[in-house]
Image (cartoon, rainbow, N blue to C red):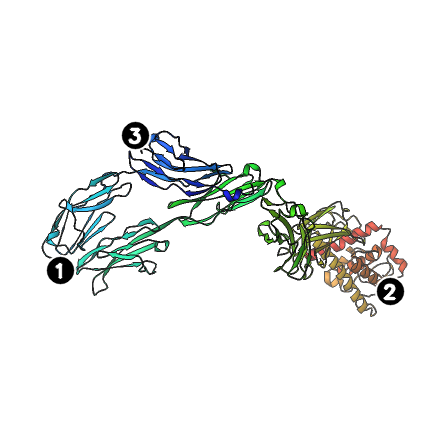
Amino acid sequence: KSNCLASELAFLLEPSDVIAVRDRPLMLDCQVQGEEPITVTWRKNGVPLPTSPRVQVLANGTLFIQSFQKRKEGNDADMGEYDCAAQNRYGMLVSRKAKILLASLPKFHTHPVSMSVYEAGVARFQCQINGVPEATITWEKDRAPLNTTDNRYTLLPMGILQVTGVQKADAGVFRCVATNPANTRYSHEATLNVTGGTPRIYKEPVILSGPQNLTITVHQTAILECIATGNPRPIVSWSRLDGRSIGVEGIQVLGTGNLMISDVSLQHSGVYVCAANRPGTRMRRTALGQLVVQAPPEFLQWPQSVSKPAGGSAVFTCVAQGVPKPHLIWLRNGKVLMPGENVKLTNHNSTLALTRITLEDEAIYQCIAENSAGTNQASARLAVAQAKDLPAAPQGLAASALSTNAVQIIWSPPPSNISDSIIGYVLAIRKIGEPNSLELQEAISKSTFQQDVTNLEAATTYSLYLKAYSPFGASQPSHTIVVTTLGGVPTPPTFFTKVVNSSTMQVLWELPSKAGKAEGFRLSYRRVPHSDFQGPIQLPCHVNAHTVSNLEPGAVYEVKLVAYNGNGESDCSKRLVSLAEEGMSDQSAGGNSLCHCRDGEVSLGSIVIGIHIGTACIIFCVFFLIFGYRHSLFCSKGTQDSWSLPRDYTRQNGNPKDVANHPRVESLPQVVTQSLLLTTCSTVFNHFFHSYTFVSHFQVYVLVEVLDSILQNKYTIDWQVDFAIIHKLIDGKTIEDLVAKISSSFISRSKSILI
């Protein structure tokens, strides 16, 4: 197989469209080059053509039909689409389709019509016939060939005869004669009568026949008719509707106003305007006709033959242009290839991808481009190399950063017994996180085992692998490595948390906006107030969510997330997450309150609640420090056995009798020493802001009671009490009761503030 790609099948000559004549011989060419032996077969309308003494395939591949037939039974007729197929041991190649038509010439379907014309006027005759091939039309006057040397006579190929400046001698009988290889036919006769001299009255310009819509193929000749009459005789001119210049090259005016464009190109397509102007005035009449120029398919990119290992992938690309836009189909060994599990057609069939290649995929692949103007074909061969024929994958691949835009790649030289079979290396590189389609490849000499890759982006992580190539194909890829250019660590990731249930949370984060800006992420978490983090959990760069389960139900956790690359870790992002279940009730004395937290809001809600708790404590202590020594804002001389009402309470309620209805705390002296509260505030703030938790529930409970009383204006406070009295405030409550009361009081207040 070492030289199989150099001896591929290729057509030297393909069959072309032919118009055959009944009972005459016909030959269709099919010449092929490639590795012998080559077998050439023919198909008609997609079905193998049987040979016979009348139908033979010559030694050079040419199809010879001794006598072309048109039978009444359609199946026996020789007309149809023919193609030849050439096959050798590497596969099959199919030629373009050639249309074979039978020459014919039916009767005229449009005959010239008799007319009367003033002397010096304009006469026009037309006949039409559909012939295969198109018939050549000439004219006769009085049964003799018309003298076409007179420039007053204009013959157009569409079967039109124009006579300008009519004279008495032009009167007579006219008919047209159509001729092609099948037959010769004559139209009906038409008489031209020439009346007296042209009247001297004014006549506005009139276009007798304007341009017709015309569709032709490039390099053909286009003729647009325009003949006008009037008195005085109008002047005919041409323009394009889009304002572009018609040009001068290949442009010719036939007769008094017919436009002929030789060797048309795609640029000649457009709408043409014929204008008949009265001399010396702006009076004119116009007629429009559209010229559509088609172009058969032409390849801009051909599929290239390749050799691939079994299990690998191959991609063929075929890009064609034409007017109208060509339709592409693919053939494998002459049969239409349909998409399947390992066959993908993309980009409007211009790209054929084969995956998980096997020996059955070794074949000749053809791209057929078709449109209404013609067909074209290009081919390439896929050779499947066996593993024993391919070099081993490169070993010892390593990379290091040289600068912000360059890295260096090194690998181990191959063993000496296989180094001679290697013709080079290909290094594949892409930003980590990018799709494989954006992979860049760089060819490297066989004698090089070190390569500097430049023009990279700073602080960006790249993945790389290497392949060795021999004449049979590519090796398996080396192991993939990652390397980060110099320039810094990633930016800290922004992340969010969602409580799934009382023992499970989900962490979600935003991926970098550009590929390669992070090699991956590391996630750690700890239960508050424990100091040790669990993890880190290493996550790849394309993952942006992770679920942590088997946590302690209802606990508070701190979550930490960092992004990293080859230069190090980013600054960490942290969040507190409370796993408290929704609807948990407070069982302590003083009433029940519910926490109506929704999933996904627990983390944010717990932070907001914590902020409000800390803020309340700060406000209380500030007020205490400012007014505590003055005994003027809250102090009053209450009794020794109860809390006293504020002096303005009755004014606020408007009814002194309501005083009796307010709750009272029995056997509670007038309240707390300043030193105790100062100590309490200091301790609570210290633990709150450094540990995110309260160590002393007792101290918190005292603050809750006092703040609750002040905020609701239920009681005034006297700061004359001994520490031992505080125990009566607790009244035997357990720590669990205190925690429940703290949750009920502050969480409900914080939620009301949020609402």
Please name the residue that numbered disc 1 is placed on: 201
**Amino acid type for the residue under numbered disc 2:** Ser
- Is 254 placed left or right of 473 in the picture? left
For label 1, the SS is loop
Please name the residue that numbered disc 3 is placed on: 72
Quick check: marks 3 and 2 in contact, CB under 8 Å? Answer: no
Task: Please state the horizontal and vertical placement of residue 656, each as a whole percent of the image.
Answer: 76, 60
In which quarter of the view is residue 460 placed? bottom right
Placement of the N terminus among the 4 image quadrants = top right
In which quarter of the view is residue 709 placed? bottom right
Placement of the C terminus among the 4 image quadrants = bottom right
- Is 422 placed left or right of 105 in the picture? right
Q: Distance of mark 3 from mark 2, alpha carbons?
A: 123 Å
* Badge 1 or badge 2: first in the primary sequence: 1
In depth, the one of 2 and 490 nearer the eye is: 2
Kindly give the residue lying farthest to the bottom in the view shown. Answer: 630
The image's mark for residue 675 is: 2
**Amino acid type for the residue under numbered disc 3:** Lys
